[in-house]
């Protein structure tokens, strides 16, 4: 019947295992929160023992409940404004399936009634994935993905290209501005890179494909092409002033 964890895992459930998620503006006193967590831990522990004893007493008429309680360990509890979610350790897949079936629903209903608390079992996506050592616990919801304001980003990049953006300075500003101009105004996007390593401040080497290298020569890049030592790449090394001049040339030609 026993399928539970080793005795090393079976530690008492204390207030340290209660995680508080209620708003600070309503429960701002740390001492009061600590006392409340202690009361919750004691209440849930007592209710757990009572429900487990009751299940053992009715093991012949309700063997599933007795088997569940024998092989279930309480790891922790997350206290939320809407109720508390139990963190449970389950030793095997079979017990885990019982926990998330009607037996588990009857168990949590009995535990909630005995503790006089709103308790629930965490939604768990680990069923049928592992055979032993399954942990069901509350997982914070992932924040909603915020879509970038592409229009604002494009407007800011255009302001940098036109020289109207505040704070667009620094040792790499001229090269970064040129990269934006080549990307947005000349349509050179894929594979275009820049390297400032090993150069004096303000100088940059643009790296691109041979086809984009020919495009840069057509645009009048003020530098001679150089071959890369790694793969078919073409490089153009420009000074800070070269970057400014080339950027203005691209910006003015794309505006006409």
Image: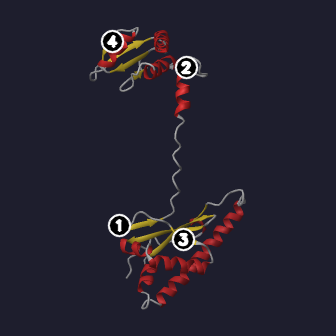
Q: Regarding mark 2 in the picture, which secondary structure is present there?
A: loop
Q: CA distance from mark 1 to mark 4?
A: 59 Å
What residue did someone put label 1 on?
Answer: 128
Does 136 sit left or right of 26 as displayed?
Answer: left
Does 217 sit left or right of 154 as displayed?
Answer: left
In terms of depth relative to the viewer, which is nearer, 232 or 195? 232
Please determine whether, in this image, residue 148 is positioned above or below residue 125. Answer: above
Q: CA distance from mark 4 to mark 2?
A: 26 Å
In terms of depth relative to the viewer, which is nearer, 170 or 73? 170
Whichever of callouts 3 and 2 sits on the residue coming sooner in the sequence is: 3
What residue did someone put label 4 on?
Answer: 225
Percent coordinates x, y for residue 215 in the rendering? 35, 15
Q: CA distance from mark 1 to mark 3?
A: 21 Å
Label 2 near label 4: C-beta < 8 Å? no
Q: In percent of the image, x 51 and y 62: which residue is there?
A: 138
What residue did someone put label 3 on?
Answer: 120
Whichever of callouts 1 and 2 sits on the residue coming sooner in the sequence is: 1
Q: Regarding mark 4 in the picture, which secondary structure is present there?
A: loop
Q: In percent of the image, x 53 and y 43: which residue is there?
A: 146
Q: Residues within 10 Å of mark 1 (few under 14, many from 20)?
A: few
In terms of depth relative to the viewer, which is nearer, 69 or 97? 97
Whichever of callouts 1 and 3 sits on the residue coming sooner in the sequence is: 3
Q: CA distance from mark 4 to mark 3?
A: 68 Å
The part of the image, by quadrant, that contains residue 149 is top right
Whichever of callouts 4 and 3 sits on the residue coming sooner in the sequence is: 3
What residue did someone put label 2 on?
Answer: 170
The part of the image, by quadrant, that contains residue 232 is top left
Percent coordinates x, y for residue 212 in the rendering? 34, 19
Q: What residue occupies the far front of the structure in this picture?
A: 256
Whichever of callouts 4 and 2 sits on the residue coming sooner in the sequence is: 2
């Amino acid at each position: 019947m026993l399928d539970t964890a080793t005795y090393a895992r079976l530690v008492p459930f204390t207030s340290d295992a209660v995680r508080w998620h209620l708003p600070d503006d309503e429960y701002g006193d740390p001492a009061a929160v600590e006392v409340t967590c202690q009361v919750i831990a004691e209440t849930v522990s007592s209710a757990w023992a009572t429900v487990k004893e009751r299940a053992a007493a009715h093991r012949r008429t309700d063997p599933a409940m007795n088997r569940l309680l024998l092989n279930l360990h309480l790891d922790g509890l997350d206290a939320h404004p809407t109720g508390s979610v139990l963190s449970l350790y389950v030793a095997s897949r079979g017990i885990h399936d019982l926990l998330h079936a009607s037996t588990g629903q009857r168990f949590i209903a009995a535990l909630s009634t005995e503790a006089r608390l709103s308790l629930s079992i965490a939604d768990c996506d680990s069923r049928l994935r592992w055979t032993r050592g399954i942990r069901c616990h509350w997982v914070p919801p992932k924040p909603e993905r915020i879509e970038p304001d592409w229009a604002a980003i494009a407007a800011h990049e255009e302001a940098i290209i036109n020289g109207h953006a505040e704070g667009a300075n620094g040792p790499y500003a001229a090269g970064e501005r040129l990269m934006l101009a080549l990307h947005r105004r000349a349509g050179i996007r894929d594979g275009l890179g820049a390297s400032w390593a090993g150069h004096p401040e303000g100088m940059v080497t643009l790296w691109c494909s041979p086809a984009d290298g020919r495009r840069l020569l057509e645009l009048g890049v003020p530098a001679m092409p150089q071959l890369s030592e790694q793969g078919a790449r073409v490089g153009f090394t420009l000074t800070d002033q070269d970057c400014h001049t080339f950027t203005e040339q691209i910006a003015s030609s794309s505006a006409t």
